[in-house]
Image: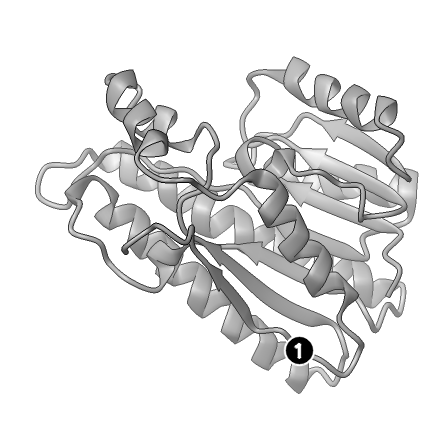
Amino acid sequence: MAAEREVVPGHSGNGSMAWDGLPGTLLSAQMSPARPSEQGKLAAECQSAGYPGTLIPYKCDLSNEEEILSMFSAIKTLHQGVDVCINNAGLARPEPLLSGRTEGWRTMIDVNVMAVSICTREAYQSMKERNIDDGHIININSMNGHSVVPQSVVHFYSATKYAVTALTEGLRQELREAKTHIRATCISPGLVETGFAFKLHDNDPERAAATYESIRCLKAEDMANAVIYVLSAPPHVQIADIQMRPTEQIS
């Protein structure tokens, strides 16, 4: 399918991918109300680079269902609907299971699980209303959604990513039961050089920097290439999950 209308909830980190392989209109929604200038900067960079299509920044707090619903309503008004939804929003808080704050756990649930589920539901309904039978829903997951590493600060985060793994497979099954050719895919990266570690270890920037200096990490462009590969697969091919790590990463 040559996608015409894509929505990407979550614009930072992997959301700052190179979108030159995604033609048409791309709406990028940020995860929180902060830093709206970053979206505008990304849109300007895409335009100046000569990428096809249009990147439209949209301010939306993805931990707030009302704002998500308003975003999809705006998409319907301005662009008819969604053909492809890439659920990219995700965050980690350093909240271990034995001593973590409930607030931090709840934030991870709201963004990593609830926002993904709400955006998935709304994207599917948008496709169904317009008889789109070849749409695609892509969940940007994590290798933490397939294995639990011995780092207490990411154990709850890992639980939310296991949820994304289950949600994606459940979605695939429900789409088959609905007798539609809309596809569902997970992309599960290991260590990607983004601002993720700096947010996780916001009180210890040296530790965050060391995370990316220890090995040659994946780049946002690697994630973009994986997304483009998934979207370019022929209609009869269902790519369930892409698991990818830096070559030098152990676990």
In the figure, 65 relative to 229: above or below? above
Q: Is residue 69 left or right of residue 23?
A: left
The crowd level at tag 1 (other Cα within 10 Å; few <14, some 14-19, many 20+) is: some
Q: Is residue 85 left or right of residue 111?
A: right
Looking at this rendering, what residue extends furthest in the left direction? Answer: 98
Image quarter of the C terminus:
bottom left
How many dots with numbers? 1
Which quadrant of the figure has residue 72? top right
Name the residue: 48% across, 66% down.
167
Name the residue: 63% across, 42% down.
221
In the figure, 239 relative to 27: above or below? below
Which quadrant of the figure has residue 59? top right
Which quadrant of the figure has residue 163? bottom left
Name the residue: 76% across, 56% down.
84
Name which residue type carries label 1.
Answer: Gln
Image quarter of the N terminus:
bottom right
Towards the viewer: 146 or 214: 214
- Residue 126 position within the rendered picture, expressed as x and y whole percent measured from the top left: 79, 58
Name the residue: 81% across, 57% down.
83
Towards the viewer: 67 or 200: 200
Task: Tell me the element at label 1.
Answer: loop
In the figure, 16 relative to 38: above or below? below
- Residue 188 position within the rendered picture, expressed as x and y whole percent measured from the top left: 47, 58
Towards the viewer: 86 or 217: 217
- Residue 204 position within the rendered picture, expressed as x and y whole percent measured from the top left: 24, 18
Task: List the residue tagged with mark 1.
Answer: 238
Q: Is residue 48 left or right of residue 17?
A: right
- Residue 56 position within the rendered picture, expressed as x and y whole percent measured from the top left: 81, 30
Question: Which colour assignment does the render follow?
Answer: one colour
